[in-house]
Amino acid sequence: MDIIDDISSGKKEIINCIKKYGSTREHNYWFFYNQQTNYAKTYFFKFKDSGLFSVRYKSGTWEIIGEVLASENKRVELFNKFLDYVLMKQKDKKVFIFVPEKFYNNIKRILQKSSKYRMTNAPDIYNTPVFNLKKWDENLEGKKWKKLRNIKNKFLKSFNVEIIPSREIDKKKLIDVVLEWRKKRPKVEKNYYIQMYLNFIKNDFEGTDIARSVVVNGEPCCITSGWKIPNSKNYYSAIGLYNYKYGSLGEIANIDDLTQIKKKKFLFADFGDSTESLLQFKKKFYPESFYKTYWFHIVKK
């Protein structure tokens, strides 16, 4: 096992691993890169041609980002090696994980048999909506789409609206959107990816396939951005935020986002883990299905 602690110099190796084994929405080099902060350092654990994204916080907590980058029959074994290194050899405090249900069940089984590790509490469970782009009507025609159509038409009549690539907008103005969004989110829903969003802006949204902003009366108000999920024809809408200055901004941004994703010929769009209130909002756009992700910590027994 090699530990790459300079992911800029290890970029080629990491990207090759993603190309070979990438399978989930988090398997994106720039998603990984942009999580570096003054209190969190990124590490890539390399096992021959396989690997694992991780972040170590100054508190002594590690986080695994996405599933292990390996063939499915090797993922649990490599996950165990990671645990042995950070909790036994390094003697750090705990590991934070958020993964889809199937990999969670695999982890749960090994923990039930383990004499070394345990889960701290019952996991927090989030639902993720998935949209079938063949069923998305970008023209919002017919009875099914009437509410969204009316919202869009009213908004466009009420304001001077442009929707343009985020890269064309002054970075400070986009940073202001993120900070205003954070300020107005309910405390229970505050997103811990704030610094990552800011890093994407500073790095010109490198690694994304779409990055768009709704500009209302000359003021940038929204950011939606994401990328192709490796080895699939599916898309992850990773960033979706707005400054709450105008009612229905969320609807306008999501209508545009789904339309752009469809134009790019993706088959399905993953719209990320959602609290109950956020999930109800996303249901307005008629997702086809949902899947669960499990958020939990592992510590030594």
Image (spheres, rainbow, N blue to C red):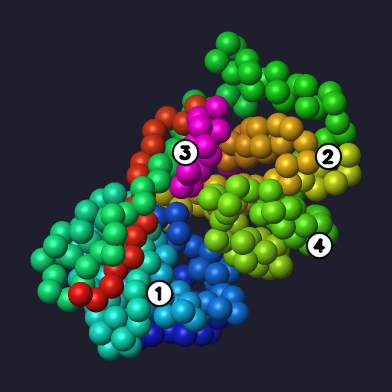
**Magenta residues (range):** 264-285
- Mark 2 or mark 4, which is nearer the start of the sequence? 4
Quarter of image, res 110: bottom left
Mark 2, other Cα within 10 Å: few <14 / some 14–19 / many ≥20? many
Residue indicated by mark 2? 216
Distance (Cα) linking label 4 and label 2: 17 Å
On screen, residue 46 above or below 272: below
- Marks 4 and 2 in Cβ contact (< 8 Å): no
Q: Nearer the viewer, mark 1 or mark 4?
A: 1
Distance (Cα) linking label 1 and label 3: 27 Å
Mark 3, other Cα within 10 Å: few <14 / some 14–19 / many ≥20? few
- Mark 2 or mark 1, which is nearer the start of the sequence? 1
Distance (Cα) linking label 2 and label 3: 28 Å
Q: Nearer the viewer, mark 1 or mark 3?
A: 3
Q: Residue at x 17, y 76 (%)?
A: 116
Label 3 sits on a secondary structure element that is: helix
The numbered disc on residue 62 is 1
Residue positioned most to the top: 143
Mark 4, other Cα within 10 Å: few <14 / some 14–19 / many ≥20? few
* Whether residue 167 is visible: no
Q: Residue at x 59, y 76 (%)?
A: 37
Amino acid identity at mark 4: Lys
Amino acid identity at mark 1: Trp
Distance (Cα) linking label 3 and label 4: 32 Å
Residue indicated by mark 3? 276
- Mark 4 or mark 3, which is nearer the start of the sequence? 4
Q: Residue 229's x, y, as percent?
A: 46, 53
Q: Nearer the viewer, residue 176 or 265?
A: 176
Q: Residue 191's x, y, as percent?
A: 56, 56
